[in-house]
Amino acid sequence: MSKNMSFRERAKILFTAHNVKIDSEGKEILLSSAEEDLIVSDMQSDRQIDALNRVTELYNMALLAMGDVQMSTVQYKLKSAYIDILVLTIRAFGDREEDLELSKKMRDVCDLIEPSDAKRGEGEPNIVMQSLWIQLLWAVKKIKKVLYSVEYINELAEMDLVGDSDRPLMDKAKECLEEFKELRGLLSILKLFRMYRESKIVRSKNYHEPEFIDLLDDHVKVMELTEEDRVEVRNKVNKVRKR
């Protein structure tokens, strides 16, 4: 069956069969136990077992990475929802706070610019909003790092180890990145703060969250991984492999 196959072809068949079995919860079988044993036997004859063990290790790492993809996506959705809630709160109460008996803390949350009595060009964007945007940026960077780790694992394996059932997770993660990049929905509030800064309605520096200034300057640029980030991811993958 696999006598004339290359190592890569044999390994791809084995891992594809394993993914199909997992995806179908055992209902679909591409290889019988006898066929799988025959492929492994051929690999032993061709002294490919060490290489198979190496790719198997990477395959297991890819499976674990899928859990990180899912978790990082959930974290992004939560942070994004917090921003949505704050924007809606500001819209609902910000213009009516004089008519409501709001606590000092609530009034501060409802102000787009802090302090509320600041003169033009002296205040800064809502401090809570700044903090939430930094948390969202961290979530975005986490997604980018996890996706890069999967890419690096596949590169080391010289094949795609991601199963069909995990591809929707990858797609959801990538959709989060596009949402952030395009500032969809209520994330467009960042454009308003950017306009405030450019129009000198708020001051241009000395913000409660210094990184928020970087977001205002170019949120697309700061979401990208630096070479240092990529080295960090590769080192983590390689460290696990050496255990």
Image (cartoon, rainbow, N blue to C red):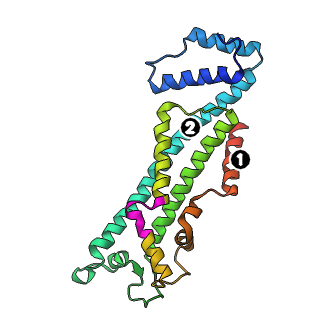
Q: Position of residue 30 (x, y in %)?
A: 52, 16
Which residues fall within the magenta stretch? 182-190
Taking the spot 70% from the left edge, 11% from the top edge, the residue there is 3
Q: Position of residue 187 (x, y in %)?
A: 42, 63
Q: Which mark is residue 164?
A: none
Relative to 234, 131 lies left or right: left
Quadrant of the image containing the N terminus? top right
Q: Position of residue 29 (x, y in %)?
A: 49, 16
Does residue 192 sit above or below 232 in this rendering?
below
Label 1 SS: helix
Label 2 SS: helix
Taking the spot 36% from the left edge, 67% from the top edge, the residue there is 86
Is any part of residue 243 visible from this angle?
no
In the image, what residue type sits under mark 2? Leu
Quadrant of the image containing the C terminus? top right
Does residue 17 sit above or below 144 in this rendering?
above
Circle 1 residue: 235
Q: Which mark is residue 64?
A: 2
